[in-house]
Image (cartoon, rainbow, N blue to C red):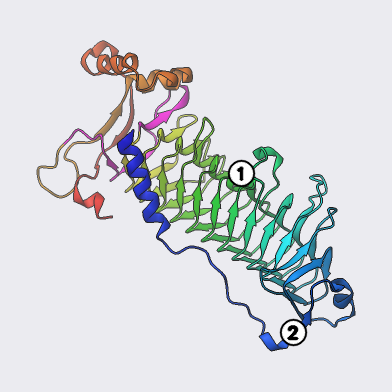
């Protein structure tokens, strides 16, 4: 355990050294705005201004709620704080081309049923950029809009509340062709993408929430370069097609429900180049894909320090695993219900429990990798046995499965050409 903890610390330290989301440069010229002193009537100024006007808030408190007019922009430093009255939504962007940039939005009403939020967007081409949201039930909500940009914001939730009692940090509903990039979401509930196709969720940091990103009926989205750390679930796709999950770090999804990436009845997924580190379950597949015309591909991912690297809820079909790394996991693959993963394609994966050899030195095993585990087989049939994992009792069961042919467990996985040695490490 000490070695595993040291490895996790080292891996997360390396990941932390990667470029992090930061402020985005503003698009408005500094001299083209109307200065708004703290304490003045911001809404009255917005109502009296023409379309496209730009307002620069000075540091200090500005009273909400605020509704931006057509094409208007409100920007300022983080020290310019738009404060909620404690009721309703604090800032609304309901006209095309409106923008909120750089300020802090503090608070919202407390109604979950009315989706009281710090910032609510219902406008094509709107932009929320470099804004700090805090003390709100819901952070940034986007509904029934196209080409929206949510860039470089920080959404701070309520760590003292139970996860189910927090609102969503960022929520997309019926939103298309939009960008959610470079944001930091901390201690909120979920980042939700529902009924929202064709969006990009990239280079965000999502920490200590429930669902890092939750898709439902949302097709053809790209999830790239994000850091999901300390959430219950990193990414979950439900009833969605054509989602690409590339080059993300998904780490420390712990507890009994901890899952790095989960998928239910979703197809044509491409999951490539991701790092699944120290999750209870790295990858969980439940009837995915559902349709016979669909296929899921998992390529060049790393699964390390997981209790279970891959779990199938039932015997899987139309999934392929190519060039993945499986190291320091307690269980490489589990199939619930007593099934197997022989209908899944496994090829050129690196398994650290491979017991074969590479006599010709080409970096690939001369014998197939075959996964058999009597204790794992029993645990898949009776999940309560997981309590005894690592105990002498289950170790004895595993030993019996290796040396007594009558108790030989079923084969779960066969990779006919497993990677070994430097080929896998140099990926």
Q: For residue 95, which quarter of the picture?
A: bottom right
Q: Residue at x 43, y 42 (%)?
A: 319
Q: Is residue 58 visible?
A: yes
Q: Quadrant of residue 232?
A: top right
In front here: 18 or 261?
Answer: 18
Residue mark closest to the camera, 1 vs 2: 2
The location of residue 278, given as percent across then percent down, is 41, 40
Instruction: Tell me which segment is drawn in magenta.
Output: 330-356
Under tag 2, what secondary structure? loop
Question: Residue 93: within the magenta?
Answer: no
Residue that mark 1 sits on: 239
The correct choice, above or below, for 172 with respect to 410 in the image is: below
- In this rendering, the count of numbered labels is 2
In the image, residue 137 lies at what x, y percent?
Answer: 74, 49
Query: Looking at the image, which is closer to me, 128 or 268?
Result: 128
Q: Alpha-carbon neighbours of circle 2 within 10 Å: few (<14), some, or many (≥20)?
A: some
Does 230 sit left or right of 409 as displayed?
Answer: right
Q: Which residue is mark 2?
A: 33
Q: Which of the two discs, 1 and 2, labels the residue nearer the N terminus? A: 2
Residue 212: where, in percent of width, then height? 57, 48
* Element assignment for label 1: loop
């Amino acid at each position: 355990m000490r070695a595993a903890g040291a490895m996790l610390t080292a891996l997360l330290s390396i990941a932390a050294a990667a470029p992090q989301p930061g402020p985005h440069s503003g698009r408005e010229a500094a001299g083209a705005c109307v200065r708004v002193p703290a304490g003045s009537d911001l809404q009255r100024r917005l109502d009296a201004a023409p379309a496209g006007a730009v307002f620069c808030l000075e540091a200090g408190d500005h009273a909400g709620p605020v509704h931006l007019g057509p094409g208007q922009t409100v920007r300022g430093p983080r020290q310019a704080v738009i404060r909620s009255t404690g009721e309703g939504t604090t800032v609304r962007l309901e006209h095309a081309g409106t923008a909120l940039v750089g300020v802090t939005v503090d608070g919202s009403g407390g109604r979950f049923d009315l989706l009281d939020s710090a910032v609510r967007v219902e406008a094509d081409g709107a932009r929320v950029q470099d804004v700090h949201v805090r003390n709100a039930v819901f952070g940034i909500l986007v509904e029934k809009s196209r080409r929206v940009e949510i860039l470089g914001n920080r959404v701070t939730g309520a760590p003292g509340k139970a996860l189910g009692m927090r609102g969503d940090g960022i929520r997309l509903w019926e939103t298309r062709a939009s960008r959610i990039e470079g944001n930091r979401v901390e201690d909120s509930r979920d980042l939700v993408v529902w009924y929202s196709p064709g969006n990009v969720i990239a280079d965000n940091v999502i920490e200590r929430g429930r669902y890092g990103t939750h898709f439902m009926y949302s097709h053809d989205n790209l999830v790239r370069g994000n850091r999901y750390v300390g959430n219950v679930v990193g990414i979950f796709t439900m009833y969605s097609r054509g989602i690409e999950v590339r080059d993300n770090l998904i780490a420390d999804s712990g507890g009994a429900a901890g899952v790095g990436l989960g998928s239910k009845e979703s197809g044509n997924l491409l999951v490539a180049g991701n790092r699944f580190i120290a999750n209870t379950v790295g990858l969980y597949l439940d009837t995915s894909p559902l349709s016979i015309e669909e296929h899921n591909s998992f390529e060049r991912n790393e699964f390390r320090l997981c209790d279970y690297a891959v779990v199938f809820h039932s015997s899987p079909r139309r999934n392929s695993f190519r060039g993945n790394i499986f190291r320091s996991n307690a269980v490489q693959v589990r199939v619930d219900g007593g099934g197997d993963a022989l209908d899944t394609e496994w090829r050129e994966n690196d398994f650290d429990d491979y017991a074969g050899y590479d006599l010709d030195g080409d970096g690939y095993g001369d014998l197939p990798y075959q996964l058999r585990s009597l204790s794992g087989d029993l645990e898949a049939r009776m999940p309560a046995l997981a309590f005894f994992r690592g105990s002498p009792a289950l170790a004895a069961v595993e030993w019996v499965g290796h040396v007594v042919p009558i108790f030989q467990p079923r084969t779960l996985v066969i990779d006919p050409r497993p990677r070994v040695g430097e080929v896998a490490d140099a990926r």
